[in-house]
Image: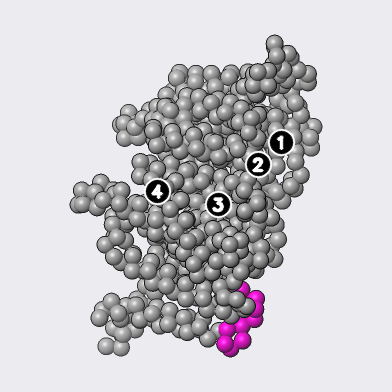
Amino acid sequence: MNLLKRLTWKNWLVVWATLLIVVYPLIGASSYMKHLFILFFVWSVVASNWNLLMGYAGITSLGNIGFMAIGGYTSGILAKTFGLSPWLTIPIGGVASGLLVTLFLGLPALRLSGIYIALLSLIFADSLPSILTQTREITGGAMGLHEIPGFIPGMEKIHAYYICFAFFVLVHFLIHRTIISNTGLAFVALRDSENLATTVGVNRFKERIKVFALSSFFTGLAGGFYVHSLGDISPTTLSIEPFLLGITMMELGGIGTFAGPILGSAVIVFGNEFLRLAGTLRLALLGALICATILFFPGGIMQLIDQAEKLMRTLIRKRISREN
Amino acid sequence: MDSLLNAIASGLISGSLYAAMALGLTIIYGVSRVFNFGHGIVAVMGGYFVWSLMQQAGVGLLPSILVSLLVMYLIGFLVFRYSINPLLKKPGWEISTVLFMLGAGILLENVLLQVYGPRVKSIPLFVQGSVKMGPVQINWHELILMGVVVIGILALNLFFKSTRTGQAMRSVSQSIPGAKVVGIDIERIFGLTFGLAFAVTGFSGILLGTKYYLNPHIGWEWMVKGFVIVAFGGLGSTLGAIYAAVILGVVEAIATLYLGAIWVWPIWFTMFLILLLLRPQGILGGRM
């Protein structure tokens, strides 16, 4: 009961935000806003899964955009070239991403620690563009894939909006379940004190493989939803900017918290449009944002919210004690 | 056969340049266990300072190199003092320093882009002309580069072995508590190490800028190459980095000759993966 009382206003906020997102297209969202919301749904899934790896399991993975590209390309190619239904190809893309990542990153990462994983994952994602240009006939090379079929024939923005929203809710529900389950606790235990965790019976290998497989599967799915709702993908997905955006989302929202990456991706997706005004300085601003967040607000937005809440609480308590 | 020999020669040259570039990374990691994800831009900045001094201010080659190294040394020291040092005192510093340096690198890269524009710059060759040794043809300039790298590495080695600061750095890299016990000021040594590594990296950027070219984005490519090299040689091991740089440089040249430049990266990645599986600590892991 105490817990419920403590979280009330946040829960209300979540309920209201969800309702607003559900009715927003019905009360006249412009096509552009719908597009931004779709981006937000997909990106927040990517950021949350990145956070699962980095924030919860403490694995410095820098290749998550690569996971997304694998899922997106697999699904896009299967749907476009072979005419399969996206509902079939998106899970295939997710599985492909999960398998490749677990094989090339998860397994080597079992024997590696800290910084080696960061290097390996960065190099993994960095070698994807050259593979894409090598396989030009299938992947479209530097031009990328275009006119990828939508989720349903004759799809409009509003359909994609609701489909991606459903995906967003489902994945975050599953991530939340994972985080509060024994598996999630094991991730955190391994992050905070590996020796203690293994001593009390956490299987380091099993949990590491699990977190890699989970994160890359969901990120691959996000890639699939991305290509089928937007219709194209190209190697620019793997360039420095999306990578930076993903990291900023996580770091700005609050790394290692459930809601942080969602808030962070909302701020970044909608804020990035304003940043376009800054033109070529945009990337510099993003870089500065990352640095400033890490130096001054390591907990990100979530830390600010917590501080604000604490302040409000002491104020309210003071007033109540005065009234009594 | 002749082309193979030529490829090996050019591989040795680029390998020695990569070694110079990777040294800065491995020095910082070896001493402070911080991995510099802004490494590429440090190299590029070193190159740009020299370019700026030579082409825009008309200073000679040697003075501009000296000024550039001094500036890079100061930048390294200040970066450590005002950003890395506070981060190291908080939990989760491993991830936060990585992300911080990444962000700072991108910030500086785009500042350079604003200041100098995206056009390619190159530092003029030290000497013109080339020499023919049997079937192999090498530019004098490249021979000089190799010589400079070898001398630089020997000088660094001398510094680490026989100066008090160098010895202190080595002892910190072996054991921080041990170094504290004998009265070494860890923060000061970390700061000096960052300065030294930034200067070395800036110097390598100058050398790379004469052989290849400079633009604000090239640092990213150099840095990722540097990552593979230091991990291949064993993080924190200077000798390992040198071996790895030469091996990978030669592999790169041979792969470019027979398969084409696009295959260099997948081959490096595969070699790296295999080495990590067989020997996760790299060729000479753990030894500085």
Q: Mark 4 vs mark 2: same chain?
A: no
Instruction: Please state which of the two labelled residues, at mark 3 or mark 2, is closer to the viewer.
Output: 2
The residue that mark 3 highlights is B103
Callout 3 amino acid: Gly
Question: In the displayed structure, does residue B170 sit left or right of residue A138?
Answer: left
Separation of marks 4 and 1 at Cα, in angstroms: 37 Å
Residue at image position (62%, 54%) is: A139
Query: Do the numbered discs 1 and 2 sit on residues whose CB atoms are within 8 Å?
Result: yes
Separation of marks 4 and 2 at Cα, in angstroms: 30 Å
Question: In the displayed structure, does residue B212 sit left or right of residue A311?
Answer: right
- The picture quadrant where one finds residue B13 is top right
Instruction: Please state which of the two labelled residues, at mark 4 or mark 3, is closer to the viewer.
Output: 4
Residue B213: mark: 1
Say which label, 1 or 3, has the lower sequence index. Answer: 3
Measuring from the top left, give residue A105's x and y in whole percent. 43, 47
On what subunit does the disc labeled 3 rest? B
Residue A106: mark: 4
Callout 1 amino acid: Tyr
Separation of marks 1 and 3 at Cα, in angstroms: 24 Å
Secondary structure of residue under mark 2: helix
Q: Give yes or no for residue A215 being in the magenta stretch.
A: no
Asked if residue B169 is positioned above or below residue A121 in the image, the reply reads above
